[in-house]
Image: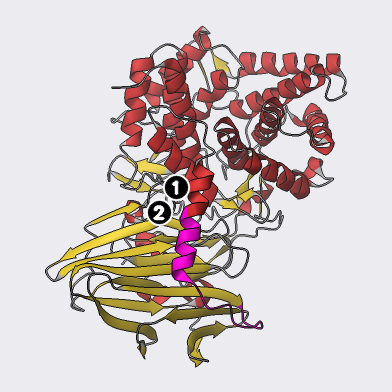
């Protein structure tokens, strides 16, 4: 049975990632890319759908014991788990070395004290748990093959097969180190090179040490910021610069419900805000790589800009349901692909333009095509900013004139005007200044409820929406504007949980609501960080700090956050770990540090 979402640790190699539970079970791994088929899909089903458990031996009728303690080794993505047992103490080190060749997951068992009986149980199931591979020996190595994929298993421990599972039973004493490695290779190619676990461990630790050393933030929240930056780096697909929203699919926003989506793709919005956080903390290489990814993905067709692409820029992300998987805690359906890819979300134009603008302002080398793309996006918006869309939250109900979408269209025009004013691009400056004014006037007239002194989710609606918290952060209105303060206070009243966390918008409970879906969802963590940001901007810095520190307390023991927090069940929900949660954590930490609003 899969653990709670917060029970998992992330390890990865900037091309794919695995989730490791407290009990030493790898329940999720897609090979060779984030969006490939999973070979371990127990997270979304049962052990029959694939897993790899490595930990102290235990009676078959009892659940595997959780690690006594676990941590990442320093500022890295190397996981260390220790078990204290009646027979002694043992440590397992899990990591995936950054690579140019075959992806590897390496697990090193180390005896600390006593003599501890251990067991490795490896059950590979290809194609998201549906296909049992052919497992056999090849020149002394174990290999599992099915169709185009082969996974090679290497260890010095003795192994045996039983019930379509590869086992190894062994005992470790102080100083013993026994390594286990799986490596992926296309099945038609030669076997991957024999792994070098100890050398790979040294190289992986050095990689993360050098990467973290580039961080320019040294404030009071450095631990949380560094862990979030490492997580964002782990969600970056190194070969192309694309950034996935999360490494998982179908972890539910509503346990037992249908709000289950595939997040293993590059949302322009998520990637753009991730880029902004990386730039503000000193990481220009990632920003440059993402800009190049964007230019390739959009190519010469900005009029047909998608809200998301595959990690190499693929456009077709057709959505399907995997009916052989029962879903995480019976939350069905399990989906792969994402049908929202072809939605119209006008806010994306603003996020992309803001990211390009920030790159320009922070000294990224000029790219003439990036400037040309920006101008093409505004020409598209000239004719389309005033049409209804699906909005930031990808509603599957009818299109609306979402206020946040209009605000971000204004941002796109405003940042492009600044680019032209700087002399780095040419465009119809006066016409676009008029356009900027027209959008601003339209939002203030049609998206603002004078009686309640708040902006609303869409034109003519009474509902609120937490995306309105971005109005002052984007510079649409100053923080001290009474309409901004009124909106912040209205969202606190109407979209706040008893714990003070923020919902995205009112959901429907049992019936379909504005998003076209039944059921509820938890507090959206990004929105809660936005609230802390806004509170600091309007001078309520002590309140902002307290909310921020409450949000930090929701992280799991390794500093990781999913998409949402279920205030009723008191647990994390949604895909995990989520870039859209870790980015605003960084942003709020930077703002509070700049304001001096932090505790002892």
Regarding mark 1 in the picture, which secondary structure is present there?
loop
Q: Nearer the viewer, residue 297 or 291?
A: 291
Asked whether the beta carbons under mark 2 and mark 1 sit within 8 Å of each other, the answer is yes
Res 276 seen here? yes
Which residue does the image show at 50% across and 7% down from the upper left? 482
Q: Residues within 10 Å of mark 2 (few under 14, many from 20)?
A: some
Residue 478 lies in the magenta-colored region: no
> 10 Å neighbourhood of mark 1: few (<14), some, or many (≥20)?
some
Relative to 167, say whether 436 is above or below: above
Is 199 inside the magenta-drawn segment? yes
Give the number of the disc on residue 257: 2
In the rendered structure, the answer to whether residue 205 lies left or right of residue 101 reads: left
Specify the quadrant that holds the C terminus. Answer: top left
> Gap in Å between the C-alphas at discs 2 and 1?
8 Å
In the displayed structure, 560 sits above or below 442; it is: below
SS under mark 2: loop
Which percent across, then down, holds residue 372? 84, 34
Residue 206 position within the rendered picture, expressed as x and y whole percent measured from the top left: 49, 53
The magenta segment: 186-205
Residue at 65% in and 60% down: 318
| Mark number, residue 367 | none
The residue drawn where x is 61% and y is 82% is: 147
Give the number of the mark in front: 2 or 1: 2
The quarter of the picture where the N terminus appears is bottom left
Residue 456, percent across and down? 53, 22
Identity of the residue drawn at 62% across and 54% down? 238
Q: Which residue does the numbered mark 1 point to in the structure image?
A: 518
Res 322 visible: no
* Above/below status of 558 relative to 129: above
Q: Quadrant of residue 42?
A: bottom left
Give the left or right position of residue 185, taking residue 2 as reference.
right
């Amino acid at each position: 049975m899969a653990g709670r979402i917060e029970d998992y640790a992330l390890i990865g190699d900037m091309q794919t990632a695995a989730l490791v539970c407290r009990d030493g079970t790898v329940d999720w791994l897609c090979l060779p890319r984030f969006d490939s088929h999973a070979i371990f899909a127990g997270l979304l089903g049962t052990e029959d759908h694939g897993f790899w458990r490595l930990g102290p031996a235990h009676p078959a009728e009892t659940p595997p014991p959780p690690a006594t303690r676990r941590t990442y080794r320093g500022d890295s993505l190397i996981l260390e788990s220790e078990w204290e047992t009646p027979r002694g103490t043992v440590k397992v080190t899990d990591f995936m070395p950054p690579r140019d060749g075959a992806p590897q997951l390496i697990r090193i068992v180390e005896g600390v004290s006593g003599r501890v009986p251990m067991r490795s149980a490896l059950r590979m199931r290809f194609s998201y748990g549906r296909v049992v591979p052919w497992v056999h020996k090849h020149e002394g190595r174990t290999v599992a093959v099915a169709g185009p994929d082969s996974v090679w298993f290497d260890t010095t421990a003795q192994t045996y097969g039983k019930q379509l599972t590869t086992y190894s039973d062994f005992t470790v004493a102080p100083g013993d180190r026994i390594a286990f490695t799986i490596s992926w290779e296309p099945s038609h190619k030669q076997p991957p090179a024999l792994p070098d676990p100890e050398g790979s461990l040294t190289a992986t630790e050095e990689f993360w040490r050098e990467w973290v050393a580039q961080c320019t933030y040294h404030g009071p929240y450095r631990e949380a910021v560094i862990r979030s930056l490492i997580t964002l780096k782990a969600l970056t697909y190194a070969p192309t610069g694309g950034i996935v929203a999360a490494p998982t699919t179908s972890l539910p926003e509503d346990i037992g419900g249908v709000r289950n989506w595939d997040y293993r793709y590059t949302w322009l919005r998520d990637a753009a805000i991730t880029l902004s956080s990386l730039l503000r903390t000193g990481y220009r290489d990632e920003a440059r790589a993402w800009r190049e990814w964007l230019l390739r993905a959009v190519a010469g067709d900005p009029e047909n800009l998608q809200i998301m692409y595959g990690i190499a820029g693929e456009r077709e992300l057709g959505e399907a349901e995997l009916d052989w998987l029962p879903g995480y805690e019976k939350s069905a359906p399990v989906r792969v692909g994402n049908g929202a890819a072809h939605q119209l979300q006008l806010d994306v134009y603003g996020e992309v333009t803001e990211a390009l603008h920030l790159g320009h302002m922070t000294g990224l080398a000029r790219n003439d095509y990036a400037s040309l793309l920006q101008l093409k996006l505004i020409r598209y918006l000239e004719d389309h900013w005033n049409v209804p869309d699906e909005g930031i939250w990808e509603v599957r109900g009818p299109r609306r004139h979402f206020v946040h979408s209009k605000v971000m269209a204004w941002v796109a025009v405003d940042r492009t005007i600044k680019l032209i004013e700087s002399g780095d691009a040419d465009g119809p400056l006066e016409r676009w200044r008029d356009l900027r004014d027209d959008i601003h006037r339209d939002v203030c007239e049609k998206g603002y409820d004078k009686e309640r002194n708040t902006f609303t989710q869409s034109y003519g609606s009474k509902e609120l929406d937490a995306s309105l918290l971005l109005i002052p952060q984007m510079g649409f209105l100053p923080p001290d504007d009474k309409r901004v303060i009124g909106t912040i206070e209205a969202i606190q009243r109407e979209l706040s949980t008893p714990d003070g966390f923020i919902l995205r918008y009112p959901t429907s409970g049992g019936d379909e609501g504005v998003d076209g879906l039944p059921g509820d969802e938890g507090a959206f963590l990004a929105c809660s960080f936005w609230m802390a940001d806004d509170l600091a901007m309007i001078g309520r810095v002590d309140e902002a700090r307290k909310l921020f520190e409450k949000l930090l307390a929701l992280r799991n023991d390794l500093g990781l956050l999913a998409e949402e927090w279920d205030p009723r069940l008191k647990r994390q929900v949604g895909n995990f770990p989520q870039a859209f949660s870790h980015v605003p954590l960084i942003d709020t930490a930077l703002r509070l540090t700049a304001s001096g609003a932090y505790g002892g």
